[in-house]
Amino acid sequence: MSNNEEKSVVLNFLAGIGIGVIVGAATALMLAPQSGTETREDLKKAMQDLTKSTEELRKRSTELLDVAKERARQAYETGREGVQKRLSKETGEQQASEEA
């Protein structure tokens, strides 16, 4: 599995957790007979859980984006250096053939 696929799996998993929290909270509220105070407390806890899951997803996404940006920068630098070496080599060969 490539790195991009692994990142996608992680992001999808974390998104699934967040959606699961929402669905679970809504289901619990609809099916559980309880007082308004208890329902409000459950809603408050569900929102806190969702906020925590969302923050974790944001942090992980930011980390993955930073890694991707660094790899792209490294690939760019490697390619640029390769092109410069190739051009230097060709220029050197051209000068050598002109001197001969």
Image (tube, rainbow, N blue to C red):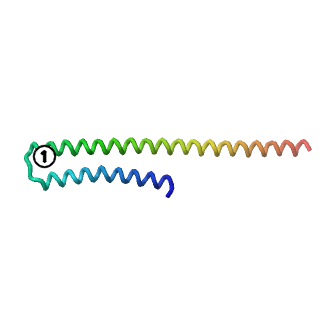
Residue 34 horizontal/vertical position (percent): 9, 49
Q: Residue furthest left?
A: 35
Task: Name the residue: 39% across, 50% down.
Answer: 11
Residue at 7% in and 46% down = 35
Report the label total: 1
Residue 88, position in %: x, y? 76, 42
Going by the image, does 81 lie left or right of 18? right
**Percent of width and height locating residue 91:** 79, 43
**Nearest the eye: 88 or 3:** 3
Name the residue: 50% across, 43% down: 67
Alpha-carbon neighbours of circle 1 within 10 Å: few (<14), some, or many (≥20)? Answer: some
Point out the residue furthest to the right here: 100
Residue depicted at 48% across the width and 53% down the height: 4
Secondary structure beneath dot 1 equals helix
Quadrant in the rendering for residue 31: bottom left
Q: Amino acid at mark 1?
A: Thr
Extreme residue in the bottom direction: 1
Tell me the residue that label 1 is attached to: 39
* Left or right, residue 7 beside residue 55: right
The answer to whether 56 appears left or right of 23 in the picture is right
Q: Nearer the viewer, residue 69 or 9?
A: 9
